[in-house]
Amino acid sequence: MSWLTDDDDEAYSEYDESSARVRPNPKGSKPRTKHRPDHADAVPGHVFTVDRGRYGVWVGEGTADERQVTATKARDLGRSPEGRISVVPGDWVDLVGDTSGDEGSLARIVRIHPRSSLLRRSADDTDAVERIIVANADQMLIVVAAANPEPRPRLVDRYLVAAYDAGIHPILCVTKTDLADPSDFLANFAGLDLTIVTSRSDAVPLDELRALLDGHTTVAVGHSGVGKSTLVNALVPEANRATGRVNDVTGRGRHTSSSTVSYRLGSGWIVDTPGVRSFGLGHVDPANILGAFGDLAQIAKNCPRGCTHLPDSPDCAIIEAVDEGVLGESGRLRLDSFQRLISTLGS
């Protein structure tokens, strides 16, 4: 049964399929291809800071054409098999687009070069999701105050664990030694092959620090209020990093530096990071910590499978060697330090 009248048939007879409007494909009719440009003309650069999706990159480092470029991250870097790829200070990258560095120009990061190291932390010890702080650093400058705020050995332990896990050499700098004697605090680290520098409020050992940092990429870390940014400003006056004082009531430092920034220092770099009060280690592999104690790691080859090397570990070859005096008093100190660092992962 038709619902159309003869008049309706006559009205619609002038239309056919060719009269129908075809809505265009909003994504375009060109088929997508899996092939991506190789960006053979990309320009290499060195990321020195990250701020809200914009990346500060040095291009032409060490040449007459050296310049700072602002860049964004290419969409493809968020589509790798491993998931989104973070670009962090210290990364070497390839850029396309406007790499002139002129005001208002914007380049695009299309590749990240292989990294020699990654310093990471997690939100807490139960969180295996890592936050990358800096790439390609080979030294960590751990800044801690002898007083105001009081030094926190366990936080320093966490920094050391992260450094050893990343294969980064740690340096411990104790500031404000004119306010308190740091000897008792430093005794916690007697068993470690740790470079130690002390600094007074009125006298920073700039020559000693520059000699240690020159030719290296050093990431500076520390609790809020310990004088880390003050130290960076002394080493790199043009850095002009924000500094703050310690709260007289809580004894805690205020967060002043809010971003991670790399500064050229001689033939190297110093990377200043925001002050933190916690440093999660949920991503750390305990085996990497043992690897930082070469003498103990060699003896550990004789330990039973699954040995934790902690005081209650049965038949631990390291503990037996220390008890028998094979490694001397220094070996005992190193074992104590190692066990404390391993215990940090579960505390």
Image: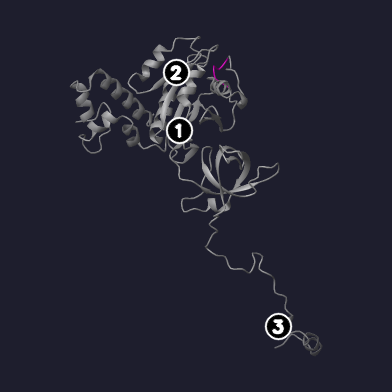
The kind of residue tagged 3 is: Glu
Q: How many numbered badges does the structure rendering display?
A: 3
Residue 170 percent across, percent down from the top left = 42, 27
User: Against 271, is 328 above or below?
Assistant: above
Q: Dot 1: what SS?
A: loop
Most common secondary structure along the magenta stretch? loop
Q: Which residue is mark 1?
A: 280
Residue sitting at 40 percent across and 12 percent down? 183
User: Against 304, is 266 above or below?
Assistant: above
Give how far apart the Cα atoms at labels 2 and 1 are. Answer: 25 Å
Q: Which residue is mark 2?
A: 197
The kind of residue tagged 1 is: Gly
Q: Which colour scheme appears in the figure?
A: one colour
**Is the Cβ of the residue at disc 3 closer than 8 Å to that at disc 1?**
no
Q: Quadrant of residue 162?
A: top left
Please report whichever mark, 2 or 1, sits nearer to the chain's N-terminal start.
2
| Closer to us: 8 or 58 | 58
Q: Which residues are magenta?
A: 249-253
Disc 3 crowd rating (10 Å Cα; few below 14, some 14-19, many 20+) is few
Q: Dot 3: what SS?
A: helix
Disc 1 crowd rating (10 Å Cα; few below 14, some 14-19, many 20+) is many
Residue sitting at 32 percent across and 36 percent down? 287
Residue sitting at 61 percent across and 46 percent down? 72
| Image position of 284 (left or right of 272) | left
Q: Which residue is mark 3?
A: 17
Give how far apart the Cα atoms at labels 3 and 2 are. Answer: 84 Å
Please report whichever mark, 3 or 1, sits nearer to the chain's N-terminal start.
3
